[in-house]
Image: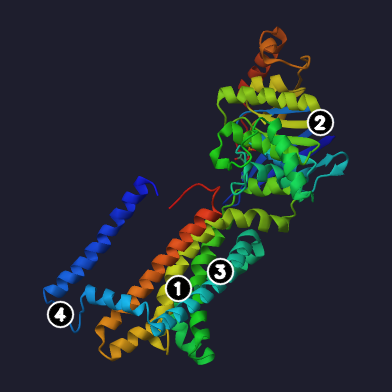
Amino acid sequence: MTALARNEALIGAIPILGLLLGWQAAVSAGVAPSALLPSPVAVFGRVAQNLGDPDFLGHTAVTLYRLFVGFLIALAIGVPLGLAGATNRIAGAALKPLVRVLAPVPKIALYPALILSLGFDDASKIVLVTADALFPILLATFQGAAMVEPKLVWSARAAGTSPAGTLLKVILPATLPSILTGSRIALVVACIVVFLAEMITSTDGLGYLLVRAARNFQTVDMFVPLIAISAIGLLLNGALALTRKKLLVGFPEED
Amino acid sequence: MIAISGVTKTFQRRGGGTHLAIDSIDLQVAEGEFVSILGPSGCGKSTLLYIVGGFVPPSRGSITVSGRPVTGPGPDRGPVFQEFALFPWKTVLGNVAYGLREAGMRKREAERQAEALIARVGLKGYESFYPKELSGGMKQRVAIARTLAYNPAILLMDEPFGALDAHTRVRLQNELLELWERDRKTVLFVTHAVDEAVFLSDRVVVMSRQPGRIKAIVDIDLPRPRHRDELLLQSRYQHLVIELERMIEDPPEEIRP
Ligand SMILES: Nc1ncnc2c1ncn2[C@@H]1O[C@H](COP(=O)(O)OP(=O)(O)OP(=O)(O)O)[C@@H](O)[C@H]1O
Ligand SMILES: [Mg+2]
């Protein structure tokens, strides 16, 4: 890490610390009875305890599983569709109106229908994550692929690459920065929606832990899943940034 | 070698109009000949080159290369663009080896040949660099090596030195001429720099604008091999430069669309 990057990380930590201090101040000032609003010290203490608790770790694993599978399916559908839509006129003409109609639909509204058709288990939640993560990936891929410099494709065609071959050898690598940007948004959305789905109906997962704690008035435990999902989001974002660095060595830097 | 006959290109414009970019171009380029296309900005030089490359279809007319009609790009015609168009995700070695790998060559052998070519364009030691780590002149050297790698019979160069500073431009002109003296490929070279066209070419095709038409074809009867320092002193060279400059400066026939 350069000195500049270290300083930036420090500056970034200040507002988060401020938030925690504000929280603690609100508790100390007695804004709400501590039975309703526990102190951050109590919450983080419980988080630390839970890290050794197989039950809690099991629920976290369930959430992570749904998140990852849903996200990967979205990637597997969104990238090929986006590439096809941007490079093939017929596919583009067929795809664009559909995407415009479906993208603004709040996917969580589909959840009751998904439960009825797929049941309460993983499948309905995974499909919901996929539905929500799909559009950021699809749209970013589409836009990125449409903007690939034609001369890159021409250079490959002249070197003997077939039209279909340029899709994998030129368009896909040239679109990678956009795909990763779309994935970053999709991962955040996926964290939100998997949690919501688990809150609505579930017998496991972090969202379920929150609802269970709320029903039993265990306010400290209510905050633990929230901290967990935000930590997951942070870690995933970091992992993606690393992937980006690895995959995009030759591309201009961006943040 | 290249026969361009009656090539016309009209672009559809937004809102239904059409724009006649080049009109009825006829041109023959012999094997091993170095021909430059010279003309003001917007006269359709790039468009013509892209059509010969098979990247853009003509609206009318036809192109044949060694008697075979052009229907798309092919490794017999290697392009070099002003914008370099290197693959940013590949290293210098990866870029230069690309065409060899596409031709089915084993990785080891392709890399060995690519290394030799990289040395030939003066970039030995830069094999593992990415394009973004290179200067403009170095990028264009890589682009030229990438194209030379698959050994096209014809080079299609679209203002390859247009984005470079004057010093680098002269160096690369000299290097290109040296390369060309060695293997005498057929070259179609687009430029709007008169001195560059005269220095390099056997013939210069002067184009006029709106629509792009061939205005004149000038034979450059200067002996080869040419050396810049000697050439600049020759009155024949100076005459040719002045003659061509007058031709381009002439106000274009104003046929506004
Ligand atoms: N894809 C396109 N769509 C519409 N018009 C185009 C397109 N490409 C080129 N033109 C038009 O065709 C004409 C010739 O363009 P071209 O790029 O071939 O000119 P040029 O001689 O290469 O110019 P320059 O020296 O600036 O590169 C211009 O008037 C341009 O506006
Ligand atoms: Mg041009």
Residue A13 picture location, percent across and down: 29, 59
Q: Earlier in the sequence, mark 4 or mark 3?
A: 4
Q: Earlier in the sequence, mark 3 or mark 1?
A: 3
Q: CA distance from mark 1 to mark 2?
A: 60 Å
> Label 2: which residue?
B29
Q: CA distance from mark 2 to mark 4?
A: 88 Å
Asked whether residue B49 is in view, the answer is no
Question: Residue flagged by tag 4: what amino acid is it?
Answer: Ala
**Number of the front mark, 1 or 2:** 1
**Number of the front mark, 2 or 3:** 3
Q: Are marks 1 and 2 in contact (CB under 8 Å)?
A: no
Please tell me how many numbered marks the rendered image carries. Answer: 4
> Label 1: which residue?
A190
- The residue nearer to you, when weighing A99 against B148, is B148
Q: Residue at x 15, y 80 (%)?
A: A32
Question: Residue flagged by tag 1: what amino acid is it?
Answer: Ala
* Picture quadrant where residue A95 is located: bottom right
**Number of the front mark, 1 or 4:** 4
**Mark on residue A75?**
3
> Label 4: which residue?
A32
Question: Residue flagged by tag 2: what amino acid is it?
Answer: Val
Same subunit, labels 2 and 3: the answer reads no
- Which quarter of the image is occupied by the N terminus of chain B? top right
